[in-house]
């Protein structure tokens, strides 16, 4: 009895194992069929399960590169991005900085952006001041300036070059208060000048500098003249940059004296491509044209040299410490930009800078490395300049010129990120070669033009 029962049980177990094996084989066949016919859309890797909203999750095993590529093929950065920034970065500093800082994705070839400027703070008198005697005991003056629009009632004005005498007999810089403004000019009264003449405002001559200061409200004032700042809309074109590398199959398999590979050719092509892009990013002209041979539209990007809002000039061969300090003052003041900026220029400009002797207010410190580039630091009382020579300026006829750039307001837009595509010219019956094409569609913009300045030798 026991023998029969054991045989019976073994038979059942054997049949069940056969059924399980059959089921597993069937499921495996269905999986392979779906994987082969429909791709990975239906066949997820082991451990990868579909989410409720179409996402993918990993369970039961650690996240590996293989699973990451299966579940999210675009998650991991392509190694080409890291390679590009390491290929001769000193040759193309502007392109290098923009890549290290990261690019904004643009959905179109034409980029439109807004920049906000600051309100002017200084102006000058166009004509001599005129006394106002119609205010009873309080007398003032009517001022006609070169830019009346920057002033509003209740604002205060400092006159740096004019001295006031207070009622206590002390000497101070003259301060005025704006009472009203109309088409004839701005009506002001003195804040700190005591005078026996008809007006408490001293006679001001044409050309006198006026500095706009803060507003002064009365105790019961609830409102004040309105202030609005409207951004200015600008645009630039993304330019399609391309480079193609090819070598024949026979050249590939031929014996060579040195290890010159296809990767070496690719690196040389990327270097040449970046040098060309650097010239467009700096000195390019924004526009479109039609290729008469291909009959297609070509979009050209505008360079940041033309976008800068300031310009400073010096005499070639006569750049001294005083002029450098004046250039630094112009670059760092009046724009609210960063206290650290880049000075990238031609070799003759950098040569003149190197000939300057150190003084207390200006000094060159040791080399500083940032964005994969080596800079020499010049410290002034106005800010720090990170200086670097660029042969691109020489090649474009600007060996005596340079550009002071605020990296905080340098933005790169990319419609097509830097990428490589392999061309199968052999199968298409064109050429028996191995080929790749390198492509990028991008542009650079200066979001705050007044924070950047051209330095021109003349």
Image: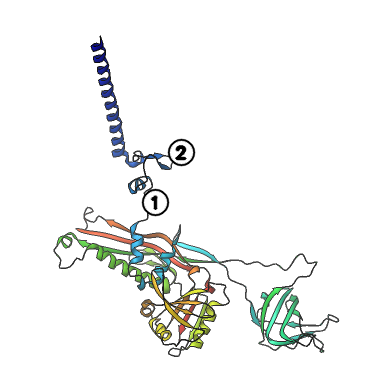
Q: How crowded is mark 1: few (under 14 residues within 10 Å), some or many (20 or more)?
A: few
- Give 52 or 178, whichever is nearer the viewer: 52
Q: Is residue 121 above or below residue 79?
A: below
The answer to whether residue 415 is left or right of residue 171 is left
Q: In which quarter of the image is residue 238?
A: bottom left
Residue 242 in picture, x, y percent from top left: 33, 64
Residue 330 in picture, x, y percent from top left: 54, 80
For residue 52, the mark is 2
- Give 441 or 88, whichever is nearer the viewer: 88
- Give 300 or 33, whichever is nearer the viewer: 33
Residue 270 in picture, x, y percent from top left: 31, 66
Q: Mark 1 points at which residue?
A: 75
Question: From where the camera sits, is residue 447 visible?
Answer: yes
Q: How crowded is mark 2: few (under 14 residues within 10 Å), some or many (20 or more)?
A: few
The residue that appears at 20% across and 66% down in the rendered structure is: 260
Label 2 secondary element: loop
The answer to whether residue 226 is left or right of residue 22 is right
Total marks drawn? Answer: 2
Q: Is residue 446 above or below residue 143?
A: above
Label 1 secondary element: loop
Q: Which quadrant of the rendered structure holds the C terminus?
A: bottom left
Q: Quadrant of residue 41?
A: top left
Q: Which quadrant of the rendered structure holds the N terminus?
A: top left
Q: Residue furthest top?
A: 1
Question: From where the camera sits, is residue 186 visible?
Answer: no
Label 1 vs label 2: CA separation?
20 Å
For residue 192, the mark is none
């Amino acid at each position: 009895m026991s023998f029969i029962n054991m045989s019976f049980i073994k038979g059942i177990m054997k049949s069940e194992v056969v059924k399980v094996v059959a089921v597993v084989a069937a499921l495996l066949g269905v999986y392979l069929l779906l994987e082969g016919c429909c791709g990975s859309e239906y066949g997820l890797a082991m451990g990868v399960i579909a989410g409720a909203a179409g996402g993918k999750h990993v369970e039961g095993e650690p996240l590996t590169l293989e699973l990451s590529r299966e579940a999210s093929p675009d998650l991991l950065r392509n190694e080409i991005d890291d390679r590009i920034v390491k290929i001769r970065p000193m040759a193309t500093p502007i392109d290098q900085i923009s890549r290290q800082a990261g690019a904004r994705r643009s959905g179109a070839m034409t980029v439109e952006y807004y920049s906000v400027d600051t309100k002017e703070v200084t102006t000058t008198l166009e004509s001599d001041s005129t006394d106002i005697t119609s205010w009873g005991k309080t007398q003032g003056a009517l001022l006609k300036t070169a830019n009346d629009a920057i002033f509003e009632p209740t604002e205060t004005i400092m006159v740096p070059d004019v001295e006031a005498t207070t009622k206590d007999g002390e000497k101070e810089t003259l301060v005025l208060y704006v009472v009203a403004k109309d088409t004839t000019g701005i009506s002001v009264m003195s804040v700190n000048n005591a005078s026996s003449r008809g007006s408490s405002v001293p006679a001001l001559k044409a050309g006198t500098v006026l500095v706009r200061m803060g507003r002064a409200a009365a105790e019961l004032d609830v409102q004040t003249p309105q202030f609005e700042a409207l951004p200015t809309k600008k645009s630039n074109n993304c330019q399609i940059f391309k480079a193609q590398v090819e070598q024949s199959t026979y050249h590939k398999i031929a014996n060579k004296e040195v290890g010159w590979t296809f990767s070496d050719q690719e690196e040389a092509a990327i270097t040449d491509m970046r040098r060309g892009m650097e010239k467009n990013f700096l000195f390019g002209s924004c526009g479109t044209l039609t290729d008469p041979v291909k009959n297609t539209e070509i979009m050209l990007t505008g360079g940041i040299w033309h976008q800068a809002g300031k310009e400073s000039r010096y005499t070639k061969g006569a750049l001294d410490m005083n002029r450098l300090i004046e250039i630094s003052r112009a670059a760092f003041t009046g724009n609210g930009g960063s206290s650290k900026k880049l000075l990238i220029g031609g070799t003759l400009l950098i040569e003149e800078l190197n000939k300057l002797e150190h003084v207390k207010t200006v000094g060159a410190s040791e080399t500083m490395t940032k964005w994969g580039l080596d800079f020499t630091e010049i410290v002034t009382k106005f800010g720090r300049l990170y200086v670097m020579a660029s042969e691109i300026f020489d090649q474009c006829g600007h060996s005596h010129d340079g550009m002071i750039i605020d990296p905080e307001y340098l933005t790169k837009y990319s419609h097509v990120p830097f990428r490589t595509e392999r061309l199968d010219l052999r199968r298409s019956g064109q050429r028996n070669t191995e080929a790749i094409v390198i492509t990028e569609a991008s542009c650079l913009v200066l979001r705050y033009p007044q924070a950047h300045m051209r330095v021109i030798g003349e």
